[in-house]
């Protein structure tokens, strides 16, 4: 598989290199040189396969011979061993695609665990690798658990102090071993900036074998394509021609993966890019002006991002496919309406959480009677226990994954958003 750098098209790298580098020259994102296309007849076959087999086939279409099929299958199996996607009906024609039944209770498990498998394969466990990543809430846990106790890999996770839920924090800041966590006194965008600065520092990068596990890493994106196919396989046949998918967006990795599944030939009618008040993209789609504002803290904290890293990939894909951006649904939902929506969902006997509620709200507003809608359930409501209990006046039981960590002390360091300090930390710890 060849990929090119969106900021320097001449820079072409293999899949292995793209996974190891994370970003290319000038922090350019890597994008597939060839966009595979599935023939209709084969699509039918694919949809009949089980999740692991189908996912391996899809991934091998992109990755090609670089990783032998049987090896790939082994890694997919290891990465996706947990309970897969589930569809739960909410109204007549709207269901939630729950992607949060993995070990850290968020969809990020799919991408992070696949990436961990691929990196350990490429690395052979020999070189020392430092994974430096920023999290707005759920990536941290998924990455930490995916790489926990892995040989020769050190994980450093930055997150905005006091801006992720207590339980989200407990899930990855209590592990220790090869997992180091730093609470940055700033926003998620500050954390992302620090990661970029570290990658710009060639000496540091080489010395520590820096790699990023953010959704910018192509291996994570490709892994996420797989559950869109699973969703399509699971929905009732009569709806397959009219499927609309609403994606709660932060860094726009999840949406990119969905669009890639469509480009492969999965007949999804349309997508809705749903954001919270941090609405850079909805405003951009409306006005064509790129005007990111200061990041605002909301109750859908994993989406508190005003400089979405994956957006250039979305634009590139639309260009390559000659699709019109006008066809992309979009919208933003503030906290007040998110809360209202959570209450409405409860009346429909569905206990959700803020991120999915935003996607549901926009789907509900934009879907037609003939269409069938899926909104992505990106995290388990228990991760936001305090918020949800207060809003909905219900008791949320903690799944075992959270219960095990809820009473442990955080082992995090604290730091101002200052690159010199981070650099020192990376060199010393
Ligand atoms: C990460 C995350 C999102 C945003 O996903 P992107 O791929 O960054 O757009 C949405 N909801 C939850 C719960 C998340 O953890």
Image (tube, rainbow, N blue to C red):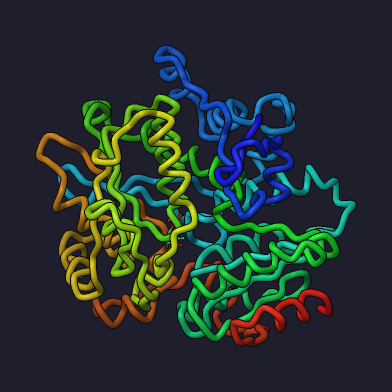
Quadrant of ligand 1: it is bottom left
Q: Is residue 47 above or below residue 272?
A: above
Q: Position of residue 156 (x, y in %)?
A: 70, 70
Is residue 245 visible in the rendered image? The answer is yes
Residue furthest to the left in view is: 369
Q: Position of residue 308 (x, y in %)?
A: 44, 59
> Residue 387 lies in what quarter of the image?
bottom left
Is residue 153 visible in the rendered image? The answer is no
* The N terminus, quarter of image: top right
Residue furthest to the right in view is: 126
Residue at coordinates 69% horizontally, 74% vertically from top-left? 175
What is the number of callouts on the image?
Answer: 0
Residue furthest to the top in view is: 41
Side of 91 where 114 appears, left or right: right
Q: Position of residue 275 (x, y in %)?
A: 31, 61
> Residue 40 lies in what quarter of the image?
top left
Residue at coordinates 27% horizontally, 57% vertically from top-left? 282
- Of residues 89 and 306, which is closer to you in this image? 306
Q: Is residue 263 above or below residue 192?
A: above
Q: Is residue 46 above or below residue 127?
A: above
Side of 377 where 264 appears, left or right: right
Side of 196 where 293 appears, left or right: left
Residue at coordinates 69% horizontally, 63% vertically from top-left? 200
Q: Position of residue 429 (x, y in %)?
A: 81, 78
> Residue 236 lies in what quarter of the image?
top left
Q: Is residue 113 above or below residue 47?
A: below
- Of residues 412 and 343, which is closer to you in this image? 412
Residue at coordinates 41% horizontally, 43% vertically from top-left? 315
């Amino acid at each position: 598989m060849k990929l090119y750098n969106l900021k320097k098209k001449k820079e072409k790298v293999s899949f292995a290199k793209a996974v190891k580098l994370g970003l290319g020259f000038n922090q350019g994102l890597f994008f597939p040189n060839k966009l595979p296309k599935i023939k209709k007849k084969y699509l039918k076959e694919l949809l009949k396969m089980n999740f692991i087999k189908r996912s391996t086939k899809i991934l091998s279409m992109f990755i090609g011979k670089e990783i032998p099929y049987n090896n790939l299958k082994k890694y997919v199996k290891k990465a996706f061993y947990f309970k897969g996607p589930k569809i739960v009906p909410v109204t007549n024609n709207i269901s939630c695609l729950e992607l949060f039944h993995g070990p850290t209770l968020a969809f990020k498990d799919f991408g992070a665990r696949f990436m961990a498998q691929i990196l350990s394969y490429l690395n052979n466990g020999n070189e020392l690798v430092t994974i430096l990543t920023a999290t707005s809430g759920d990536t941290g846990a998924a990455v930490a658990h995916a790489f926990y106790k892995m040989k020769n890999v050190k994980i450093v996770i930055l997150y905005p102090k006091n801006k992720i839920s207590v339980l989200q924090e407990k899930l990855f800041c209590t592990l220790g071993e090869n997992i180091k966590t730093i609470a940055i006194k700033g926003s998620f965008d500050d954390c992302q900036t620090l990661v970029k600065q570290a990658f710009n520092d060639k000496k540091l990068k080489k010395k520590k074998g820096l790699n990023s596990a953010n959704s910018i890493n192509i291996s994570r994106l490709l892994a996420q394509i797989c559950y869109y196919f699973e969703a399509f396989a699971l929905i009732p046949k009569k709806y397959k021609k009219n499927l609309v998918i609403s994606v709660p967006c932060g860094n726009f990795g999840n949406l990119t993966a969905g669009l890639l599944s469509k480009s492969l030939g999965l007949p999804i009618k349309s997508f809705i890019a749903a954001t919270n008040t941090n609405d850079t993209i909805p405003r951009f789609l409306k006005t064509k002006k790129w005007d990111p504002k200061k990041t605002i803290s909301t109750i859908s904290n994993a989406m508190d991002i005003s400089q979405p890293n994956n957006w250039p990939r979305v634009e590139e894909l639309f260009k390559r496919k000659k699709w019109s951006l006008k066809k992309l649904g979009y919208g933003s939902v503030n906290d007040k309406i998110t809360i209202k929506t959570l209450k409405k969902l409860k009346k429909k006997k569905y206990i959700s959480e803020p991120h999915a509620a935003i996607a549901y709200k926009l789907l509900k507003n934009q879907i037609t009677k003939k269409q069938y809608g899926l909104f992505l359930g990106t995290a388990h409501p228990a991760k936001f226990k305090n918020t949800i209990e207060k809003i909905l006046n219900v008791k949320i039981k903690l799944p075992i994954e959270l219960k095990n960590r809820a009473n442990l002390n955080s082992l995090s360091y604290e730091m101002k958003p200052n690159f010199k300090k981070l650099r020192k930390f990376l060199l010393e710890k």
